[in-house]
Amino acid sequence: MAAQNVTPGTDRYSMAELMVVCMARVLSGEEEKRGGGGANAIIPLAAGRLAQLTTAPNLWLGTGGAGSMNGKFDRLPLGTWDPSCDARAECKNYMMDVVDTFLKARMPPQRMAMRDGAGSLGGIQIDKYGNSNMIGIGGKHPKMKVRGPGTVGTIWSASAAQGLFVEHHNKRVFVEKVEHISGPGWLTGGDSRHKVLNGRDGPIYCWTPIAVMDFTEDEHRMRLVSVHPGYTVKDVVENTGFELVIPDKVPTTTEPTDWELNVLHTQVDRGGRLKNRRLTIGV
């Protein structure tokens, strides 16, 4: 049985566009923020650019492989490695300088405001405490059944990222416990992360093609916040490989406004890359 493409049941927007809008909304504010995304993380990249234009004018949006800062592209690049990220950028850095910049962002807790940016990590596995695995599954190195893209940037960026995101929601992605930790979330829950990472907070949100999650205040277990149009709490539960915290009332995710979609379509993704992005549920 193949995974099914997700759809919100309307032609106004795609689920990828809904995820971008949701991520951009939580970045609202005048304070400075630092953001970015992984090599192929075009959803966080689009969210960061949309936020700059709508909710977070003082967001610093970096692209690792391309090495640019605050690129003003209006056609969404293929990834943060794509040279088109550099369009009308404020500056361009070598990759070693990009890494050094974000290593310096691992600052003491009193300066954590600068780290609450648009950064979001993906994972081939994510567990109930928000730990992510990009290393591989099915055994230990070098005898893994599936080798992931690796850990470049994920260890230190996980100490600065605001959230997690995935493009496929199923039990293979959302597992009870990740086989390897390439991006530390809330580790084993409770105050375990604070003890290991000198008081630094873990991820706040997790965005998926069918839902938005966050983490409880005490155990830091993943909790359902809202379900996207066209889907139900049952859909989320049946496609998650661990027990989610489910509130008594779970609302439907607020749809994008015409204004948000207009900015997205005309100033971020004129080529419609997000409109055709394949996001799935199941298997």
Image: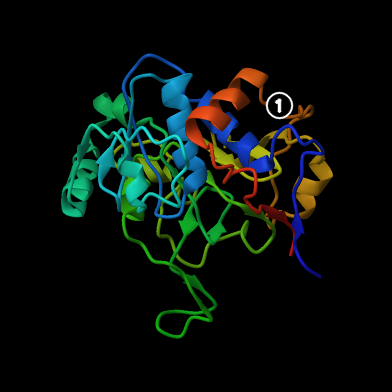
Above or below 32: residue 155: below
On screen, 8 above or below 122?
A: above
For the C terminus, the image quarter is: bottom right
Q: Kindly state the secondary structure of the residue where label 1 is placed.
A: loop
Residue name at image x 24 percent, y 37 percent: 105
What is the quadrant of residue 14 in the picture?
top right
Q: Which residue is mark 1?
A: 255
Q: Position of residue 24 (x, y in %)?
A: 51, 28
Of 260 and 24, the residue lying toward us: 260
Q: Does the image show residue 14?
A: yes
Spot occupied by residue 119 in the image (x, y as percentages of width and height): 41, 39
Residue 129 pos. (x, y %): 53, 48
Is residue 159 visible in this depiction of the protein? Answer: no
Residue for point 34% across, 39% down? 160
- Kind of residue indicated by mark 1: Glu
Q: How is the image coloured?
A: rainbow
Classify residue 234 as left or right of residue 12. Answer: right
Q: Nearer the viewer, residue 199 or 50?
A: 50
Q: Is residue 110 above or below residue 45?
A: above
